[in-house]
Amino acid sequence: MSVTPIEKVNGRALPETSQAESWARAGIADAEAEKIRALTAAEIEERRIKAEAEADAIRIKATEEAERQRLANERAALRFEREKASELAKIAEANRKKEAEERAAADEREQAEAVKQAETEAAQAVETATGRWRNTAKGFYALCAAVALPVQMAAFYKPGSEYLLVAPVFIEVIALVALVGAAAAVTAGRPHWHYRLVAWAGALTAATINVVHGLGAFDAATAFGTALASIAGPGMWDLHEHGRIARRDGTLTWRQRRAEKKAARVEATERAAAEAKDAAEKEAAREAAEQRAQELAKQRAEYFPKVWQHAVKLAAATGETTVTEAVWKRAHNDIEGTDPAESVDIIRGRNAAARRVLAARSEAPGEKPIKVTNVQRADQMPRTQRGPARKPPVRRAGDTQKYVSAARKQAAIAARAASKEAQS
């Protein structure tokens, strides 16, 4: 039998072993190595599976993150498109408003220019008509003077006194100068009545001369015709100036005055109708208020007889003809001690209802509220009396031992907790 040499491990000599033991140990070592290799392969497989699972999880997470990012990008793009569309709509609306304002301003300018052009044309037409009317009146005045002067000159003609022929011309010129002065006064906005008075005096003087001399030297037609010519010329010119005066002073025409009177009558009628309607509405409101006051007084007398009687007396004492709100409030406070909306019964009922609500809120679903007994009031001594008329035990000194300080503190804490629970 061969013996293996002595082996040393860590400087120590190992005992000699047989070949069978060596083989056994080698088999055990091989088994252990195989076991380790199997465990290593399992761990490698487990780690591979775990790595694949982690990779799948990372890949799924990345896919989900990419999907979320894509959805976020789409939402951002949609939001951008909405905002862009909104801004474009606002810009388009602003442009439309601007264009509308510009068109309105252009239309307004065109209308203003058209009105101005119409006013200018109307003013030019008025000026043209006025000038034509003025020139015609002047020509007519000259014609009338030419018709009236011969009879007047015949009236002043005397052989050897030919200078008197200037007198009728002087009379006609008086009227003409006075009318020119009246025109200047009208233009300057000065008083003009005295100029017109002098002109009419000259015209009437010439007409009188024509009538008197014409009837004696000629016939009636000549007399009254020339007299009419003496008056018609200055009169037509004065009529022209009268129109200027009316236009300057803004004097209304007969048609305008008639329209104003008619409008004033219509307005007065409408005002009277409106006043009558207001009066009827006020009367109806007053009657409704009186009816409501009577109904209120009846209800107060029916529901609060004592307070109503006191209120009537109080109103009479204070000089009121009716029970006013101030009197009623004072009377209710005197009798009930509260404002009209309160009373002792109402206050008690409200308090009782509040207590019932608190009790109902403290109940658990399906349970009845339990009254918590104060720990400090619990009986500590046995009852010595029996029967319906039993009395609580009377504690005397020395019946029970005193609580230690820790027990007293704990009892106080328990009592506070129980009181808070009962209140909640």
Image (spheres, rainbow, N blue to C red):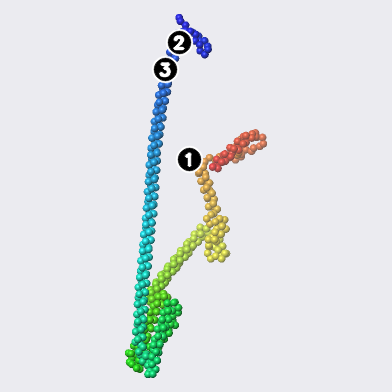
Pick whichever of labels 1 and 3 is earlier in the sequence.
3
Q: Where residue 203 sits in the image (x, y, percent)?
A: 39, 86
Q: Nearer the viewer, residue 110 or 181?
A: 181
The amino acid sitting under disc 3 is Glu
Indicate the secondary structure of the residue bearing disc 3.
helix
Q: Is residue 101 above or below residue 88?
A: below
**Label 1: few (<14), some (14–19) or many (≥20) C-alpha neighbours in 10 Å:** few
The amino acid sitting under disc 2 is Ser
Q: Where residue 14 sits in the image (x, y, percent)?
A: 51, 10
Between the C-alphas of marks 1 and 3, the distance is 69 Å
Which residue is disc 1 drawn over? 365
Which residue is disc 3 drawn over? 34
Pick whichever of labels 2 and 3 is earlier in the sequence.
2
The amino acid sitting under disc 1 is Pro
Q: Nearer the viewer, residue 273 or 300?
A: 273
- Mark yes or no: residue 30 visible: yes
Residue shown at 34%/84% (left/top)?
Answer: 143
**Quarter containing the N terminus:** top left
Which residue is disc 2 drawn over? 22
Residue extending furthest right? Answer: 397
Residue shown at 37%/90% (left/top)?
Answer: 152
Task: For marks 1 and 3, give the one nearer the viewer.
Answer: 3
Indicate the secondary structure of the residue bearing disc 1.
loop
Q: Where residue 248 sits in the image (x, y, percent)?
A: 41, 75
**Quarter containing the C terminus:** top right
**Label 2: few (<14), some (14–19) or many (≥20) C-alpha neighbours in 10 Å:** few
Between the C-alphas of marks 2 and 1, the distance is 82 Å
Q: Is residue 142 above or below residue 99?
A: below
Q: Where residue 72 sits in the image (x, y, percent)?
A: 40, 41
Between the C-alphas of marks 2 and 3, the distance is 18 Å
